[in-house]
Amino acid sequence: DTEVTQTPKHLVMGMTNKKSLKCEQHMGHRAMYWYKQKAKKPPELMFVYSYEKLSINESVPSRFSPECPNSSLLNLHLHALQPEDSALYLCASSQDRSGGVIYNEQFFGPGTRLTVL
Amino acid sequence: GNSVTQMEGPVTLSEEAFLTINCTYTATGYPSLFWYVQYPGEGLQLLLKATKADDKGSNKGFEATYRKETTSFHLEKGSVQVSDSAVYFCALSVGGTSYGKLTFGQGTILTVHP
């Protein structure tokens, strides 16, 4: 299995709702990432988990809360979002390290298209 | 800091034309270089990569060579198809405290007409 899956594909939520995005990979990768992508722009890194620990938080507002329950799963909990948070949210994974070698190519999921009303 | 500059698009070509998308970079240390492709409505797919100077990455007829002397990683394809229409992102990754971060170029939209 060489893919990253994300659910749901589309999500519409109000500014007072609480929702979660889910990401799963079964490639044995130990690093997982959340990105936000606006139309016609490159992805912007939000969070990095390495060996299930949060290693990078790119100063993301607290209304976004990541969680890594185990090495295969990554969640992004959403609460009190703003309309400007509407975007494509991409999850990615990479092998991280093995035998002293760093593997930094990232494999992306198809994304969740989020609309905040 | 690290940065990637791609040629501005959009690029419009006829089927079977030759494609070049320029990519230059600045980086601290020795980066790994990548080309990602994003088809409409999808996530990013890794197209090819190179991890050290003079490495050539290739996949699906696309090629790019890591040129340290010119800090470039230009993407080429000899004969494009309509199915190659997509957005192409050049990206780099370094280790150290920036480990885990991909620095992307702005993306180049490619449209191929029959």
Image: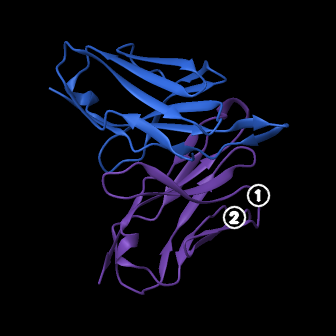
The letter of the purple chain is: B
Mark on residue A64? Answer: none
B108 left or right of A38 in image: right
Q: Is residue A3 above or below residue A50?
A: below
**Which residue ends up furthest to the right in the rendered image?**
A99
Residue A43 drawn at (x, y percent)? 43, 42
Residue A75 drawn at (x, y percent)? 44, 22
Dot 1, how many residues are within 10 Å of its Cα: few (below 14), some (14-19), or many (20+)? some
The C terminus of chain A appears in which quarter of the rendering? top left
Q: Amino acid at mark 2?
A: Tyr
Label 1, label 2: how many angstroms apart (C-alpha)?
A: 7 Å
A101 left or right of B59 in image: right
Q: Chain of mark 1?
A: B
Instruction: Name the foreground residue: A45 vs A97.
Output: A97
A93 left or right of B41 in image: right
User: Residue at point 75% right, 35% down?
Assistant: A97
Using the rendered view, name the quadrant where residue A18 is placed: top left
Q: Amino acid at mark 1?
A: Lys
Mark on residue B52? Answer: 1
The letter of the blue chain is: A
Query: Please, what secondary structure does the residue beneath circle 1 have?
Result: loop
Q: Earlier in the sequence, mark 1 or mark 2?
A: 1
Q: Is residue B30 above or below residue B21?
A: above
Q: List the residue tagged with mark 2.
A: B66
| CB-based contact (under 8 Å), mark 1 and mark 2 | yes
User: Residue at point 54% right, 52% down?
Assistant: B4
